[in-house]
Amino acid sequence: MRFLATILLLLTIGLVHETAASEKKAVQPAPNGISIPAGYKDWRVIAPAHRTDNNTLRVILGNDIAVEAARSGKTNPWPEGAILGKIVWKQKNDENWAAAHVPAALAHAEFMIKDSKKYAGTGGWGYARWLGMDQKPYGKDANFAQECVGCHTPVKSMDYVFTRPAPIP
Amino acid sequence: MRFLATILLLLTIGLVHETAASEKKAVQPAPNGISIPAGYKDWRVIAPAHRTDNNTLRVILGNDIAVEAARSGKTNPWPEGAILGKIVWKQKNDENWAAAHVPAALAHAEFMIKDSKKYAGTGGWGYARWLGMDQKPYGKDANFAQECVGCHTPVKSMDYVFTRPAPIP
């Protein structure tokens, strides 16, 4: 009986641990209902960027559809199903190479999801952003996406995307 | 016979095309004998960087061993078999967002390969660099790697690696 009790105890501990881990991973959807794309941190690179107006470093990643489009030059328009992910960090000077900017704290991860029908109201792209390491959804309500559209409208002729794929041999 | 001739012609064309494609892909090894790591442009991101002393943007990628080490904080020392790849572009100002630096021409792709025994003479890391989109090996002879070691020696206490993995949730 003591053996059985030990087994049950270990199983219970395992279950509790697993539940805790899942809870830690649960990211709330954005106010427009978009869920954070699964596995984005394993996506491939499309380009880096550096902003001098807000002192941030960025990496633009893409899901497989987006990366294939980027590498074959078919990005105007981007294909249906393409997702672009941008990871943004505050910059700091490297402690061992003062002239280099390197990532400090994570600012946010943000996404553009191409679905011309579903997101017809926002130029064919669904927008979402999650703030910081605890990935708090950005925006009070679904209207936050109009802010995204406003900022991206100057590049409407590039299918609303600023990023140009970086040349990689 | 005409049918067979057509088939043979098509097969020949196919073969010639394939040979041309392979020749295009063949990248010469570095002067220290290191071959360019296969599939590096599909590797995952460890961090971006920006250098103000030579106006370049960089993305540091890693093979699976390196990325697992980066994500679990086991980078001092980096594990045997880890490969870090750095892709470097000249910067330009984004044509639609003047305060942003974005990639212009590719400068080079360079690598650090961890093998304490094989590369004991250069601090346990094998170094190699390929220039531009035609991926010309850098260095006149195998001694070029001493230049790499010299530059990386200030971070000897970090296993000769400047890059600190960027936080990604």
Image (cartoon, coloured by chain):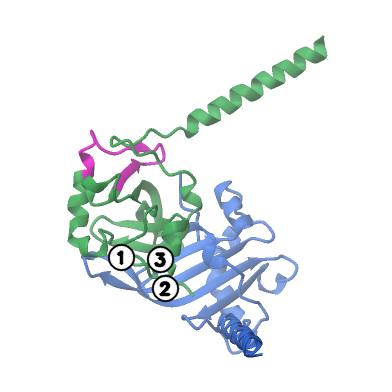
Chain colours: A blue, B green
Q: Earlier in the sequence, mark 1 or mark 2?
A: 1
Of marks 2 and 3, the one in the foreground:
3
Mark closer to the chain start, 1 or 3: 3
Amino acid type of the residue tagged 3 in the rendering:
Ala
As displayed, is residue B138 above or below residue A126?
Answer: above
> Which residue type carries mark 1?
Asn
Do pointers 2 and 3 mark residues of a single chain? yes
Q: Is residue B104 magenta?
A: no
| Magenta residues, start to end | B126-145
Check disc 1 and report the residue beneath it: B76
Residue at (70% x, 71% y) in the render: A119
Q: Pointer 3: what residue?
A: B70
Front residue of A132/B70: it is B70
Residue at the disc numbered 2: B167
Residue A103 is at least partly visible in this image: yes
Instruction: Identify the image quadrant of the N terminus of chain B.
Output: top right
Chain to which the residue tagged by mark 1 belongs: B
Horizontal and vertical percent for residue A29?
A: 63, 82
Camera-side mark, 1 or 2: 1
